[in-house]
Image (cartoon, helix red, strand yellow):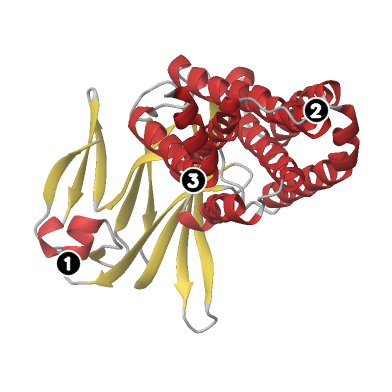
Amino acid sequence: MFRNIFAWINKYERHLSVAAVVGGFIVDSIYFDRIDIWQTQIVFLVYAIICFISIPLLHYIEMRGARTGWRPRWRGLVPIATQFALGGFWSGLVIFYGRSAVIGASWPFLLLIFAILIGNEVFKKYHERLVFTSVLFFFALYSYAIFLVPIYTNHIGTLTFLESGVAAVIVFGLFTALLRMVGKERFLTDIFHIRLGSLVVFLILNLLYFTNILPPLPLAAKATGIYHSVERIPGNYTGDTEFANQTWLARHLGLAPTLHVVEANSVYAYTSVFAPTALTTTIVHRWQWYDSERSKWVTRAAITYPIQGGRDGGYRGYSAAIMRSAGRWRVSVETADGRVIARLPFTIIFVDQEPLLETITLP
């Protein structure tokens, strides 16, 4: 019976690998919540261990098989385990990177997931797949280290990002040493491409970081909104909104609302930003008005305040700006070095008298 099962697995290995990637996505979507809890770290650690073992193991099996002709029946399970772990890595990264920024900053990871699925069909030969999976493993390690290191250093910034790169390179160096140990001859034929691919990944992630495209992990916007006023009450926050006057899209899909305000009155931006326990940093509310004549966003105010990590719902805060221009506005919620966590677009229409407002409790 086992012989038939293993034969079926080997026959449909590439299709099962794709299913394993999808399986990793499903597991993460069910179980991932906070990035800084030990359960999440254990899941990522398991993914890393699986890749750390399964990729060299397949390398060893292929090397020995080429020399002796012997390959174990369960060989087909090894690439499936690798793809499951990589699928889990990518889904976890998309979940947390997606929470940490607007979609414009997360699209490279969505493209990479698509590339993984295509790669399972394109890179069929052993040498190609060894290079492909090894480079993807480095991408996963580096991307994971970017939001893991701040959890333990309790700060974010350029130094932390550089430390993340060093940590990823050290772990990947141990991984390549293991590849060399279990199959030196075949390793030497592929090491140049593995190193070249990893260098490209390293340069791309650094380019994304230093051009402020990479999301500001591990920060994440949990709740945001634009209100006529925001007030802090004991243990909570309330906001005044003209919910009844909004379009269906604004009410139910969270799209840009329209606020009817008296000229020179203030509008409030409320945000709840998650940060890991013990991490402290500064948040910036950058108020911008769109100048249609010059076709550019003009900053009208930049208000900063410190946040402290640990609260499940995020650290809550708000800012206000006086409305002296009607039209399109947005509030960019950023880190101190300009990385965008969220954007709150809205439209201002001046009226003689403000509409009837509804007071709600903010999350």
Kind of residue sitting beneath label 3? Val
Frontmost of labels 2 and 3 is 2
Kind of residue sitting beneath label 1? Thr
Q: Position of residue 110 (x, y in %)?
A: 51, 53
Q: Position of residue 10 (x, y in %)?
A: 55, 38
Which of the marked residues, 1 or 3, is nearer the chain's N terminus? 3
Q: Is residue 60 left or right of residue 99?
A: right
The residue carrying pointer 3 sits among few (fewer than 14), some (14 to 19) or many (20 or more) residues within 10 Å by Cα, namely many
In contact (CB < 8 Å): disc 1 and disc 3: no
Secondary structure category for the residue under label 1:
loop
In contact (CB < 8 Å): disc 2 and disc 3: no
**Image quadrant occupied by the C terminus:** top left
Kind of residue sitting beneath label 2? Thr
Residue 219 visible from this viewpoint: no
Secondary structure category for the residue under label 2:
helix
What residue would you read off at disc 3?
18
Q: Is residue 323 above or below residue 237?
A: below
Most foreground residue, 283 or 75: 75
What residue would you read off at disc 2?
68
Q: Position of residue 335 (x, y in %)?
A: 56, 42
Q: Residue furthest top?
A: 38
The answer to which image quadrant residue 360 occupies is top left
**Image quadrant occupied by the N terminus:** top left
What residue would you read off at disc 1?
247
Most foreground residue, 31 or 134: 134
Which of the marked residues, 1 or 2, is nearer the chain's N terminus? 2
Q: Is residue 266 left or right of residue 147?
A: left
In contact (CB < 8 Å): disc 1 and disc 2: no
